[in-house]
Amino acid sequence: MSPEVPHISEHEPKHPRLIFTSHVDIVHPHVRWRKKEGNLVGSLDDMLPSAILVSVLPQLKGEPRWTEDEETKMLDAKKLARWIVRSYPQPKGMYRHAKDRSWLPRVCVLEVSDIHLDCDVSFENFVFMDTKKIRQMMSQPHLGDITYAISGRGGGDETFRMAEEFIPSFSLALPIFGDMHTFKSYVPIERIEKYKRVLLEVDKLYG
């Protein structure tokens, strides 16, 4: 009996290979930001990651998508997941490798988080993704000043809708302090720039 050989993915998804999502609906009826003592203070969920995504659009290879109902039923994310399934048909013979989703694009959900507050960024909610690649990416010398955490399960977000369709996905979260659904949430301004740098590295890795 021959030893088991790990399956190696043989497929590459067509363009776009990476999709970024960020939601623009908010719990608080107004958006208000201000700088205070080195922090950005205001209603940051999820307008801050959305603004960061807009700021890097000219540099992205991945495709940006914005959703409008993450705080309620996440129907926009569900529609996106179903569009991915329709647009990226499964290659023949893939039934033998149930964990291989290599023909599908990766979905990176941009979020804020109230866990891992001691870190600059956190990677959460992995669905059919290899965390080793993330660790290798973050071990690069030019990212050495950025602290991070990896959590298989984080807060509820649109990766849950991707998981329903078995789409490879994960959350790139910006840890913030305070109640994220009020004007009292805040984040160090230097952490915003670090989040942007990591977002661009994710784009290089999967885009």
Image: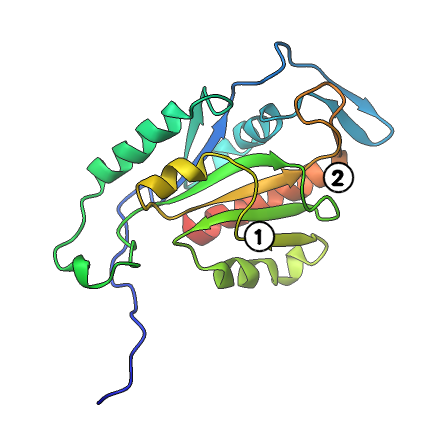
Left or right, 93 with reference to 115: left
Residue placed at 56% from the left, 39% from the top? Answer: 155
In which quadrant of the rendered image does the N terminus lie? bottom left
Q: What residue type is disc 1 on?
A: Ser
For discs 1 and 2, the disc positioned in front in the rendered view: 1
Tag 1–tag 2 contact (CB < 8 Å): no
Local SS, label 2: helix
Rendered image: mark on residue 190: 2
Q: Residue at x 87, y 29 (%)?
A: 37
Mark 1 Cα-neighbour bin, 10 Å: few <14, some 14–19, many ≥20: some
Name the side, left or right, on which 26 lies relative to 147. Answer: left
Callout 1 secondary element: strand
**What amino acid type is highlighted by mark number 2?**
Glu
How crowded is the residue under tag 2: few (<14 C-alpha within 10 Å), some, or many (20+)? few
40 and 4: which is toward the camera: 4
Q: Mark 1 highlights which residue?
A: 151
Name the residue furthest left: 92
Image coords of residue 189 (percent x, y):
75, 34
Image quadrant where residue 177 sits = top right
Which residue is depicted at the point 65% across and 25% down?
44
Which badge, 1 or 2, is on the more N-terminal residue? Answer: 1
The foreground one among 135 and 156 is: 156
